[in-house]
Image: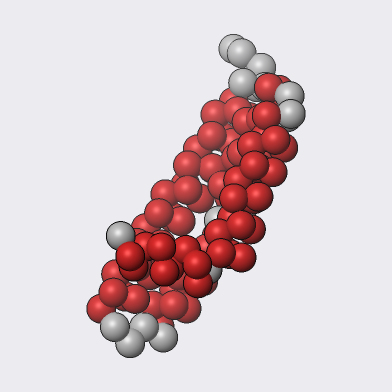
């Protein structure tokens, strides 16, 4: 418990920024109309290709096993997010095709 309090006191500015980011994100997403939510999220998921590149760079410079595992996990989760974004976008675009 003491180490948690020490961590919080040491990183209070970063924790404050993360908390504000969470509230800002909730406010922005809650005000997006339902019609625009799916295209917005599919585009955001596709942008996660940047996360994959960053994770590959981290894995390339990893000196510890923990850094390698975290980098690999970031690559896997980023890839799932990118693929999910393209699947959602494909399904969304299929709704606008003419039916036979």
Q: Is residue 66 left or right of residue 34?
A: left
* Residue depicted at x 54% and y 34%: 88
Across and down, in percent, residue 82 comes to 50, 50
* Residue depicted at x 42% and y 49%: 80
* Residue depicted at x 38% and y 70%: 71
Q: Residue furthest front?
A: 2
Q: Is residue 12 left or right of residue 36?
A: left
Across and down, in percent, residue 40 comes to 67, 38
Would residue 63 be seen by someone viewing this image from the given angle?
Answer: yes
Q: Quadrant of residue 47?
A: bottom right
State how many labels appear.
Answer: 0
Q: Residue furthest top?
A: 100
Q: Is residue 95 above or below residue 19?
A: above
* Residue depicted at x 72% and y 37%: 28
Q: Is residue 3 above or below residue 93?
A: below
Q: What is the image's colouring?
A: secondary structure
Would residue 52 be seen by someone viewing this image from the given angle?
Answer: no
Across and down, in percent, residue 13 comes to 61, 65
Q: Is residue 74 above or below residue 45?
A: below
Relative depth, front residue between 35 and 95 = 35
Q: Residue furthest left?
A: 65
Q: Is residue 63 left or right of residue 43?
A: left
- Quadrant of the image for the N terminus? bottom left
Q: Quadrant of residue 55?
A: bottom left
Q: Is residue 47 left or right of residue 53?
A: right
- Quadrant of the image for the C terminus? top right
């Amino acid at each position: 418990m003491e180490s948690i309090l020490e961590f919080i006191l040491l990183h209070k500015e970063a924790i404050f920024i993360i908390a504000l980011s969470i509230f800002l994100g909730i406010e922005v997403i809650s005000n997006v109309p339902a019609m625009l939510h799916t295209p917005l999220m599919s585009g955001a998921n596709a942008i996660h290709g940047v996360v994959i590149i960053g994770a590959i760079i981290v894995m390339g410079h990893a000196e510890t096993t923990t850094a390698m595992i975290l980098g690999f996990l970031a690559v896997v989760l980023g890839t799932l997010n990118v693929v999910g974004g393209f699947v959602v976008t494909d399904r969304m675009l299929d709704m606008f095709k003419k039916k036979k």
